[in-house]
C-alpha cells in the first residue's frame, strides 16, 4: 500500500471540495485561527510515515487529550475507574449537562467534557502532579521534549469556560468530584491547551495501534486488553453525537477536538492525525472527516 500516494490524492480532493466549516468561536484564542489550513500525518507501526500540508503546524490538542487522561488513570487505577465514569455513548454534544442530574453525576463516558472532568479529578488523587505526569507521557511517547501547555489558550478557555464551570459544580454537588473545583478546572483547561503538531499526535497515539505499546518509545502504556477497550470507547463515543456517523462512514476508532484535530487508529497497522480548524455543526473538523472518509474508501482500511 502506497500511503503517501493516497494521502496526496485525498488531500487534494478535500482542498478542492472547498467545504471548510468554521473555527470554534466560544474559545477566543481558537476563533483567531485561520480555518483554511490542513495537515495530515500517518505513522505506520513499521516506523514509516506519510504526510501532507501543514503537518508541522502547532495546534492545541483539545478534547483529543481526553483519551490520554483516561489512559493515565486507567493504567494506574485499572477497572475501578468505571465506577466513576461509564462507557455508553451519550448521543449529546460534548458540553452537555443533560444526563447528569438523573444519573447521580456519573457521566456516560470519559470523552464528554463531564467525563473528562471526572477523570481529571481521579488523576488528582492518583498523582501528586498530574500535569507533569501528562506532559511526561506525551513527551516520552512523541520523543519531543518541547511539547507544553499553551498558556494563552488555557487562559482564554478559563475566561469563557462557563459551561465547564457549570459541569464541574453540578458533578461536585452530586458527589462525583472530590477536589477543589477551581484547581480541577485549571488542570482540565491546561490539558486541553497542550500544543503539538500532526506528527506528534500520530506518534502519540501509536500505542492504540500497537496493543498498548508506544511504537516510538517501545514503552507499554496499557495492556493489549486495556488498549482494545479504549479503542472500543473511541469508536462508540469519540465524536459525541456524531459517533455513529463517524463509525458508519469511516469505521475506525478515533477522537476529535474543537481545535480541528482528529486522530484515528487502525489497530495493528497505523495511527493517523489530521488537523483542519473549520468545524461542522457537531464540533468536529469538517475537512478532517472528509479526508478520513476519502482515505478509508481509497485504502479499504477499516476495522469492519
Ligand atoms: N477545551 C474544550 C472545552 O472544554 C474541549 C472541547 C472539545 O474539544 N470538544 O470546551
Image (cartoon, grey):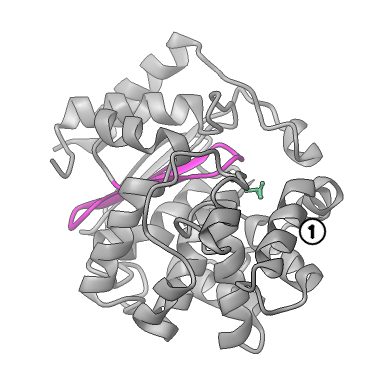
| 150, 199: nearer the viewer | 150
Numbered disc total: 1
Residue at position x 79%, y 48% in the image? 162
- Judged left or right of residue 263, residue 191 is right
Q: Is residue 59 above or below residue 84?
A: above
Image quadrant where residue 16 sits = top left
In the rendered image, the residue lying farthest to the front is 102
- Judged left or right of residue 222, residue 94 is right
| 139, 67: nearer the viewer | 67
Q: Quadrant of the C terminus?
A: top left
Q: x, y (%) of residue 171?
A: 65, 64
Q: Is residue 116 above or below residue 278?
A: below
| 225, 212: nearer the viewer | 225
Secondary structure of residue under mark 1: helix
Q: Is residue 61 visible?
A: no
How would you classify the magenta stretch by its main secondary structure? strand
Q: Is residue 103 above or below residue 288?
A: below
Residue at position x 71%, y 67% in the image? 173
Dot 1, crowdedness within 10 Å: few (<14), some or many (≥20)?
A: some
* Residue under label 1: 151
Q: Quadrant of the N terminus?
A: top left
Q: x, y (%) of residue 295?
A: 27, 29
Q: Is residue 260 visible?
A: yes
Q: Magenta includes 177?
A: no
Image quadrant where residue 260 sits = top right
**Disc 1 Cβ-to-ligand 1 distance below 8 Å:** no
Segment tinted magenta in the rendering = 253-274
Q: x, y (%) of residue 133?
A: 58, 80
| 105, 131: nearer the viewer | 105
Amino acid at each position: 500500500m502506497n500511503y503517501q500516494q493516497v494521502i496526496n490524492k485525498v488531500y487534494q480532493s478535500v482542498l478542492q471540495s472547498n467545504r471548510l466549516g468554521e473555527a470554534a468561536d466560544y474559545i477566543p484564542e481558537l476563533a483567531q485561527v485561520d480555518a483554511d489550513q490542513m495537515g495530515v500525518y500517518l505513522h505506520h507501526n513499521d516506523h514509516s510515515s506519510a504526510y501532507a500540508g501543514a503537518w508541522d503546524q502547532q495546534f492545541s490538542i483539545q478534547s483529543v487529550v481526553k483519551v490520554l487522561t483516561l489512559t493515565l488513570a486507567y493504567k494506574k487505577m485499572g477497572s475501578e475507574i468505571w465506577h466513576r465514569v461509564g462507557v455508553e455513548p451519550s448521543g449529546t454534544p460534548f458540553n452537555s449537562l443533560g444526563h447528569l442530574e438523573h444519573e447521580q453525576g456519573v457521566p456516560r463516558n470519559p470523552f464528554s467534557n463531564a467525563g473528562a472532568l471526572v477523570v481529571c479529578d481521579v488523576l488528582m488523587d492518583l498523582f501528586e502532579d498530574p500535569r507533569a505526569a501528562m506532559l511526561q507521557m506525551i513527551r516520552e511517547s512523541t520523543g519531543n521534549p518541547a511539547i507544553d501547555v499553551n498558556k494563552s489558550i488555557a487562559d482564554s478557555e478559563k475566561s469563557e469556560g462557563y459551561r465547564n464551570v457549570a459541569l464541574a459544580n453540578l458533578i461536585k454537588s452530586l458527589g462525583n468530584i472530590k477536589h477543589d473545583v477551581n484547581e480541577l478546572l485549571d488542570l482540565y483547561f491546561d490539558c486541553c491547551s497542550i500544543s503539538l503538531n500532526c506528527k506528534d499526535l500520530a506518534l502519540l497515539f501509536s500505542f492504540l495501534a500497537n496493543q498498548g505499546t508506544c511504537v516510538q518509545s517501545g514503552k507499554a502504556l496499557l495492556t493489549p486488553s486495556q488498549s482494545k477497550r479504549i479503542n472500543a470507547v473511541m469508536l462508540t463515543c469519540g465524536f459525541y453525537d456524531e459517533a455513529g456517523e463517524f463509525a458508519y462512514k469511516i469505521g475506525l476508532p478515533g477522537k476529535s477536538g474543537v481545535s480541528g484535530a482528529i486522530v484515528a487508529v487502525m489497530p495493528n497497522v497505523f495511527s493517523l492525525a489530521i488537523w483542519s480548524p473549520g468545524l461542522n455543526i457537531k464540533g468536529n473538523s469538517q475537512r478532517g472527516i472528509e479526508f478520513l472518509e476519502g482515505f478509508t474508501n481509497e485504502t479499504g482500511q477499516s476495522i469492519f
